[in-house]
Amino acid sequence: MLQVGVNGYGTIGKRVADAVRAQPDMTIAGVTKTSPDFAAEGARTAGYPLYACDEESVDEFHAAGLAVDGTVGDMVDASDVVVDATPGGVGAEYRPLYEARDTPAVFQGAEAPDVAETSFNARANFDDARDADYVRVVSCNTTGLSRLLAPLAETYGIEKVRTTLVRRGGDPTQSDRGPINDILPDPVEVPSHHGPDVQTIFPDLSIDTLGLTVPATLMHLHSVNVTLESTPDSRDVCDLLDAESRLFVVPERSGIGSCGQLREYARDAGRPRGDVWENCVWGESITVEERDFYCFQAIHQEADVVPENVDALRAMFDMADAEESVARTNAALGLERDGDARPDPRVAADD
Ligand SMILES: NC(=O)C1=CN([C@@H]2O[C@H](COP(=O)(O)OP(=O)(O)OC[C@H]3O[C@@H](n4cnc5c(N)ncnc54)[C@H](OP(=O)(O)O)[C@@H]3O)[C@@H](O)[C@H]2O)C=CC1
Ligand SMILES: O=C(OP(=O)(O)O)[C@H](O)COP(=O)(O)O
C-alpha cells in the first residue's frame, strides 16, 4: 500500500484524500491543516491522521480540543509521497522540505510548471510522469482542455485551437471572491495563461485562449473551436468523445441545459459532495463544419483534477500503465460508464 500524505486539506486536498482512500493500492498517511476549523474536525471524523502546519499551530489545535499527530515534517516522514494541495506558490516553498526527506510530491495547477519535472494529465501524457519524483497536475481548466484535445489530436490531428473560458468567480466556500454583479475580462491579456499551460502537456500545439470571470461558483464553461487536419462527421466525433471515460457527452434527452442541472445530476447519482469528475460536453453542441470542430464543455473546478492526482501517483511509482490506472481510479470512485447509467448521447429527446 502506497502511503500518501496530503499537505493542505482544502477544496482539492480533502477530495484527493477521499479519492486516495477509496483506491485498493494506496492509503492516507495523514493530512495537514493550518487551523483547527470545521475541516480539521472533518479530517479527524474521517479518521485521517491530522498534522498541524507548524509547532505554533499545534498549540492552537490542542486549545481547540483537537489532537494532532505532529507537524508537516512528521507527516512527510510517515509518507511514501506527498500530494501538495496548498495554495499557489506555497507548494514551491515546501519542495525543499520534501527533498530534504527524500520524499516525492505531486503539486497542483497554480504552481509554476518548473516546480516539477513534468506537468501531468492522465489521458495525454501519463508516461511522462513514470518514475518522476516531482509532478504537477495541471489546473482544472487545463485538465479539462487536455482531456478533450487528446482524442481529437490522436484521431484527426489538430491545426489550431481557439477557446474562450468562462471562469467561475470562486468556489462555493470562497465568500470573499467575486465578482457578485459583473463580468470581467480575466485575465485581460490575450492569450490567457491557459494556452501556455496546455502546452506544458502538448508542447507542439497551436492554441489561443481567452478568459473571463462571471458571478458563479458551480463550474467553468468552455467555448471550444478546434481546426482539425481532417474532416470527420459530427456523429463520428460525438462517438469518439463519448468513448472517453472522463468525458460525459451530455445527451439532449437528459434535459440537462445548465451547470446547475449537471451538479444536481451528480447529487442525484449520490456522488460525494455532488462532484463531477468528468468534463461535461453538450452533445448537441458537437458540430463539425469542414475542418472546424465546435463544442461547449463544463468543468467542475473542485473535482476534475481529483482522479488525475490518483493517476499521477501510480505513474510516479510505476504501479500501473495509463489504461489500467485510469480504469482502477474510475472503478474505485464510481466513475464507470455502466455504474452511473448515463444515457446514450446519440439518442435525441424525440427518438
Ligand atoms: N479550487 C479549485 O478550483 C482548484 C484548485 N486547484 C489548485 O489546487 C491548489 C489548492 O487549491 P484549493 O484546494 O482550492 O485551495 P484551498 O485554499 O481550498 O486549500 C488550501 C489548503 O492549504 C492549506 N494551507 C495554506 N497554507 C498552508 C501552509 N503554509 N502549510 C500547509 N498548508 C497550508 C490550507 O489550510 P487551512 O484551511 O487550514 O488554512 C488549506 O487547507 C492550488 O494550486 C489550486 O490552483 C486546482 C484545480 C481547481
Ligand atoms: O485554482 C483555480 O482557480 P483559481 O486560481 O481562480 O482559484 C482553478 O484551477 C482554475 O484556475 P485557472 O483558471 O487559472 O485554470
Image (cartoon, rainbow, N blue to C red):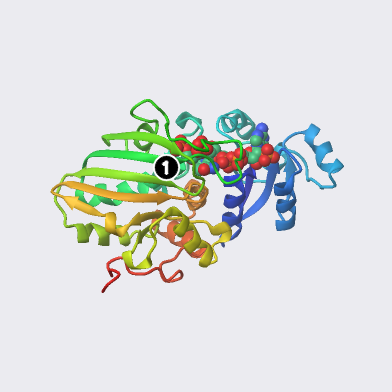
Residue 222 location, x and y as percent?
36, 45
Observer able to see residue 107: no
For the residue with label 1, is its CB less than 8 Å from the closest atom of ligand 2? yes
Tally the numbered discs: 1
Question: Between 156 and 324, which is closer to the camera in this rendering?
Answer: 156
- Per the image, the residue denoted by label 1 is 141
In the rendered view of the protein, which quadrant contains the N terminus?
Answer: bottom right
Label 1 crowd (10 A; few <14 / some 14-19 / many >=20): many
> As displayed, is residue 141 above or below residue 340?
above
The vertical placement of 190 against 235, above or below, is above
Q: Quadrant of the C terminus?
A: bottom left
Query: Which residue is found at the position 72% from the left and 36% from the top?
Result: 53
The residue sitting at 61% across, 52% down in the picture is 17
Q: Measured along the vertical axis of the image, is residue 254 above or below residue 75? A: below
Q: Residue 284: name its quadrant.
A: bottom left
The residue nearer to you, when weighing 306 against 78, is 306
As rendered, which of 59 and 192 lies closer to the eye?
192
